[in-house]
Amino acid sequence: MIHHRPPTPADPAARPGHPAHTAPAALRGSLTARLDDPARAWLDRALDEAADHPGTHGPISVWELRLAEAGRRCGTEHADAVRVLILHAARADTAALDRVYRQGTADERRAVLHALPHLVPGPDALHLVEDALRTNDTRLVAAALGPYGARHLGPHDWRHAVLKCLFTGVPVDEITDLARRAHGDTELARMLGAFADERTAAGRPVPGDLYRVLALTAPPHADGTGIDGKET
Amino acid sequence: MRIFDPHIHMTSRTTDDYEAMHEAGVRAVVEPAFWLGQPRTSPATFLDYFDSLLGWEPFRAAQYGIAHHCAIALNPKEANDPNCTPVLDHLPRYLLKDRVVAVGEIGYDSMTPAEDLALEHQLQLAADHGLPALVHTPHRDKLAGLRRTVEVVRASELPPERVLLDHLNETTVKEAKDSGAWLGFSVYPDTKMDEERMVAVIKAFGTEKVLVNSAADWGRSDPLKTRRVADALLAAGFGEDDVDLVLWRNPVAFYGLSGRLDLDSLTTGATHEGNSILRGGE
């Protein structure tokens, strides 16, 4: 028996405290309120150290050490937010983010993906999103489709990522800017239709999320009353 | 019944095994780094393997409601290969990670000078990183190997109370127990230990600091041997509390020495999003 987790109903953008969608100052505020005293003291010290000693020092910088132990210091459920705050405090650039990702556990890699929209203005870190999308770890696939991926993924890779979510059971609510990017995307509509046909031919169920995405691909109305009236 | 398998190589097992293990009561495992059957030729392949123990494998386990932790080390056999030993320089950054609950498996295979060096070095790494150590005892010349292992542990900075001596049997259990270390037994279909011999050893030496594992890997082995031992203990008249001590509380206590054991996800049900091991195209 596979232990399915119920799909996440909420749009992550609407989830307060989501580390990819919340500005670091607000993220720190909401996190601080939820940590116990020892964890809060540890976090304060870790962020001060990162701010005072950013960059690379010796075989492992002190802020990278704090990244590694964030889960056991603050609790697994807070580790993503803590790691994003440490990366932000250390002003990690693309090279540092690349190293942390390459040397990271799956949890640390996910935190790097969440940190990208706060730290990398252009597409320089897109290769990390592409790496995460090649995995079959649904936590990484979902994180890759956050604000940074939404902004920088090209149409072909983005469409395949949407399809991968449907294949692997990542709720499409995890995909940032899904409605905006899907709107008027006739190629995505074709791919979704072909996938539905394939499932139907096999006598297998079509994922419910597929029809939701398909509806979002509807082209803009000729009278200009589409969602944003913009062709994709 | 809740079972913690303190030594199993899930990398070599299938999702069918995870499913059967969960059905049998297994809720937590520790996967120590080991030899893959095919000799490695460079440190780089160790790094990919360690990354898998901290990435894909815990994800896979979580799909079946099993908490996965790991132990990281250069294994005894490959400690003899100069193509592999440079991986020792990479271990410190792995030993910092969440979910790394021990250095292991280390110890002796053929009792060579190279193995001496690797064992001493990695016991020191365990002491430096606040981790316990999972120490394999050799299959050949076992009692002599156990004695030499205990000597090296005694000479190290790692106290024996933070060492699990594994693959013990009738000939080595007494001296291992006298050393103050934790006592690991691997139960196999036809080598190492079996269920009935395990019951006899526990009758003779008690349940204190005793851990039972399947050590299941790519060879002839059985990931459900932990459950078989639990059933054999009950059939022999041991109580449920004895079984829980050996198959859950002792491994939790030993790996809990790391401060990194995270079993909360088991009680909250918060594992991972999505459902899975589905490949694109399925």
Image (cartoon, coloured by chain):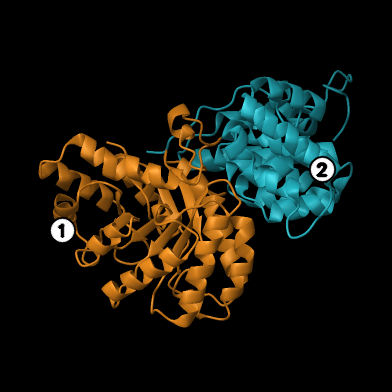
**Can you give x and y, in whole percent of width and height, for residue B33 in the image?**
48, 61
- The reply, left or right, for residue A151 in relation to residue B93 is right
Above or below for A211 versus B235 = above
Chain containing the residue with disc 2: A
Q: Say which residue label 2 marks.
A: A90
Mark 1 residue type: Arg
Gap between marks 2 and 1, in whole Å?
56 Å
Q: Residues within 10 Å of mark 2 (few under 14, many from 20)?
A: many
Residue in the foreground of this view, choosing between A222 and A6 = A6
Chain containing the residue with disc 1: B
Q: Say which residue label 1 marks.
A: B197
Tell me the residue at 47%/75% (across/down): B116
Tell me the residue at 55%/27% (across/down): A7
Q: Is residue B186 visible?
A: no
Tell me the residue at 83%/25% (across/down): A220
**Quarter residue A87 falls in:** top right
